[in-house]
Amino acid sequence: MVQCGLEDCPISEKGRTHGMKDHPERTARLQLLEHMFAGHSWQAAVSQSGLHISRSTAYRLRQLARDEDKAAMVFLDDRHGHPYKLTKPVCLWMVEFCTNNPQVASSRVQAELKSTFGREVSVSQINRVRAANGVTRQGHSRVQGQGEKN
């Protein structure tokens, strides 16, 4: 079973799992966006939502929500961007790639993700997903005595 993406990612900051419903201000942010898209001023939208945010933050959230590719970022605070970059299709590709090429270094997987999907994912995140799915790198075995220092 592939374990990544927002819905089923077991890997997260300090081992906790997160979902959009876990964000404490999710409902308030949705209300803010609803009021702003309905044509209310940012001040009215902020007061209706109960958030304590500045004008620039309100408009930044509205701008992010308008862009389909960035809309999820409105609710991804405290995640440093990693889990959403490894969506299910990206994760499935990565697990398949690592299963077919177990000797490939994570830095190479990182470069492949960048060229194939345009996603910049850290090597540590790649290693966590590889470990969670049992497709860790299998290095070359050394012949005893070779490479040892006296």
Image (cartoon, rainbow, N blue to C red):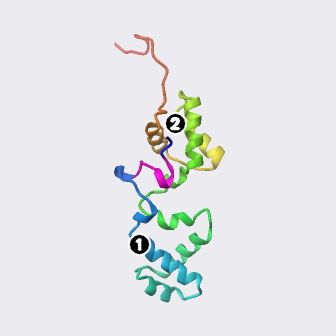
Pointer 1 or 2: first along the chain: 1
- Residue that label 1 marks: 25
- CA gap, disc 1 to disc 2? 35 Å
Residue under the point 41% across and 66% down: 23
How far from the left and from the top, in percent, is residue 149?
37, 15
How far from the left and from the top, in percent, is residue 18?
41, 57
70 or 133, which lies in front?
133
Quadrant housing residue 24: bottom left
Q: Which residues are magenta?
A: 4-12
In the depicted structure, whether residue 124 falls above or below residue 73 = above
Residue under the point 52% across and 85% down: 42
Residue type (three-letter) at the residue carrying disc 2: Ser
| Residue depth check, mark 1 versus mark 2: number of the one nearer the observer | 1
- Residue that label 2 marks: 106
Question: Which structural element holds mark 2?
Answer: helix
> Is residue 134 a member of the stretch shown in magenta?
no
In the depicted structure, whether residue 102 falls above or below residue 88 = above
Question: Which structural element holds mark 1?
Answer: loop
Residue under the point 53% across and 78% down: 33
Residue type (three-letter) at the residue carrying disc 1: Glu
Q: Residues within 10 Å of mark 1 (few under 14, many from 20)?
A: some
How far from the left and from the top, in percent, is residue 103?
53, 27
How far from the left and from the top, in percent, is residue 32?
49, 80
